Amino acid sequence: MDGGNISKNALFTAEIRVYGIVQGVGFRPTVSRHAMETGVTGTVCNKGPYVEIMAQGTEEQVESFLDALRHRPPKRAAILKLDVKTVDCETVYPDFQIIESAKTKGAIYISPDIAICDECKEEMYDPENRRYLHPFINCTCCGPRLTILDALPYDRERTSMKEFPMCPECADEYYSPETRRYDAQPVCCNDCGPEVYLIRTDGQSAKNREADKPIEHACHGREAITETRRIIADGGIVSIKGIGGFHLCCDASNEEAVSRLRRLKNRPMKPFAVMMRNEAVVHEECEVSELQEEILTGHQKPILLLKRKPGGRICPSVAPDNPKVGVMLPYAPVQMLLFDYDDGIVMPDVLVMTSGNVSGAPICRDDKDAVTELSHLCDAILSHNRLIRIRADDTVMDFFEGKPYMIRRSRGYAPLPFYLENDHISKGQVLAIGGELKNTFCISSDGLLYLSPYVGDLADLRTVEALKETIERFKTLLEVQPELVACDLHPRYHSTMVAESLGLPVMKVQHHYAHILSCMAENECTGQVIGVSMDGTGYGTDGTIWGGEIMLADIHGFKRLASIVPFMQIGGDLSAKEGWRIACAMLHDLIPAPEECLSVIRQLKLCDENTAKVQRVMADRRINAVTSTSAGRLFDGISAILGIRKASTFEGEASISLQFAAERYAESEMETLTEAAKKELEEFLKEVAFAEHLPAHELPAVMINNGRLYPANGTADPKTDDRRLLMPTDYLTKALLQMRLQGEDSGKLAYYFHAGFAAQIVETCKSLKNITDCNKIALSGGVFQNGLLLKLVVNPLREAGFEVLLHSMVPPNDGGIALGQALAALAAFEKKHRGKRYRKNQERIPERMIERMI
């Protein structure tokens, strides 16, 4: 700070603006304490987009004050920018005060919900403390934020806590700078805060309950918590309202209880998340790295996918046939009280804590929803009367190369924004609707991209309504009026219909291009990349189903340069659940002779003979059949051919089982392979990846243009040329089939598939590098949740000299594509405002490249 000729002891005033996560984290109380320590007078005010401080004192005092701000902010704050300027001020401030919040325009940062802090835990279990066993204890460092917020600035009267007037003792703490609850908006105690209560259901459906009939509370307060604990300890199921919605909870060590929950929820195989008493229990049950423990015990407390230790307490039905389990620690006070309470009931150390919803619907957030949707799934509902304004399901995080690898980004992380600085990206206001599955949306304003909490799958109309409602609330909180809305290219998706209903200009973004853009956005990349996008389903620009794509992309468009070999996806939506259908379709292509194909299907026990014949007729006549390059369905088909999983009860089950089989083989066999076995694998990879047939100056043997086959040296009109390189996945499938019929171990073949598919991706990228001169790779799509495949692709790409962009804090699955859609919209928005037209066809390629391809 420039004090000019002002004396060291002269009084002057600095106007300070602090940007970042500075609301709902005790920032103003901390500023006040720093001012008192350094002798600075003045004011601090919450302006909405930033906190404004008027700091008055000597130069030394103000410099000390600024140093404290920079180096000793509140635990949960994140200062992104600090603007300081000296101002002329006639006012002499007698003291330092927190003054009433005032709204102003500008970028807005909203704090996610924060897990209970250690100080509050200690108070909650102190019998001498007036908040002893208080289910809603919080302070300036912890407690609900986003989920109780009505509007900004973040003050009590604009949250769900406005319904609960503070008692004199809480008010004293709230207004006293010396306390941990100074200006803590959700502050309350057992006398003035929300109340827990129990609703009896006894497992009976309440769908026919009269809408106007009051919901009866069986008991309240301590009695409700004790009864909840008793039900769980006795093997029952309770739905429990937390910070961002309801969970279904039972004893994770009780096989009968977990199996019953599976039957009631009609969820035979999909893993349940587990909440554990403390980190000591986690170490007993799972393998935990230093970083994983840091995140597990941090203030966000996501669900971490951890490798289970043998012989643990978690029963098999929690995560059937899965070497990992999703683990989290209690993050809300009421969850801690489930484990430890003064009622003498002995509770298990591990509890199933899975989202409280029926399949496909959004997580329940109020009593009406819980009673209607969950009564038949549980014996009781433990609820409370603090309203949840915005749903926030639990965040799920895996790890890759020792770093976080997000699977679902929600509570604790959303809606922290991403920022991209580029002259070709608008700072305008756009809304990106996101995907049909794993939906999140994204709102951009002033160069910040706010990715929402997890919404869910839009096949259920209740989730569609939840999406619409949450979008409106975010528009209000962020003070945004979008000028453009981006959505998926698919004409019949609910997400597309939502976008088209908003009365705004709509930009449709191809699904796999959005995946690549989301990876680019997370890595702050706006230049050209070779994008490898592998997932289950996406609507292609040619009207077919895409899903195994490699493209040249930047923020203005893309060109599809390669894909897996197309196959017929027969059976409509069933084909995404029944991998045996995909297997049959691939076998029809590989084995033209009907009787021979039928014999192979019979040997592999894919389906009965009549069904196999029907499948062939449907393929030949293209009945309920679409052309597909879906990598996800390829994995499902291979899983069926290898006899690992013929059908899925949840999305990706067959593919995940294929991965686990490959990983088991890798762990048990790869370290001790004989020289002959190593040579066999090397020869296999050379054959299936066409490594010997990809000289630097040529493309592979076959390319496609509008359904017609072209030789690599064929010619085409550069303006309509849609030729692409085909990864030989049919050769890979055929090689695995022959080995399977010869009796090879399915685990070995599962590993060979992963290695072969990875090698094809790597060799294709090498070939495309010679055409495009592009040395940067972006990997995205739900298939890259497969850690084994990711490793087998990333390492050889780096060895080949590529720079590889990976996801970390944005999911590679459809939960991240809204970020990519938003980036595409912002780039188009900027181009429009520069007097250029929207690009009607996003798929593009430089003519110099077309010439080189020809």
Image (cartoon, rainbow, N blue to C red):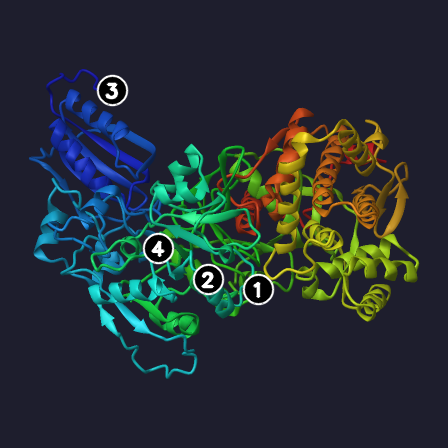
Q: Is residue 238 above or below residue 91?
A: below
Q: Amino acid at mark 2?
A: Val
Mark 2 vs mark 1, CA separation in Å: 34 Å
Amino acid type, label 1: His
Which residue matches tag 4?
348
List x then y, in percent, for residue 779. 62, 39
The answer to whether residue 651 shows anywhere in this view is yes
Q: Nearer the viewer, residue 832 or 19?
A: 19
- What residue is disc 2 on? 258
Mark 1, secondary structure of its residue: helix
Give the spatial CA distance, label 4 vs label 1: 42 Å
Q: Which residue is mark 1?
A: 494
Marks 2 and 1 in Cβ contact (< 8 Å): no
Check disc 4 and report its element: helix, strand or loop: loop
Amino acid type shown at disc 4 = Pro
From the top left corner, tell me how far across and down residue 581 is, in percent: 75, 61
Quadrant assignment, res 518:
top right
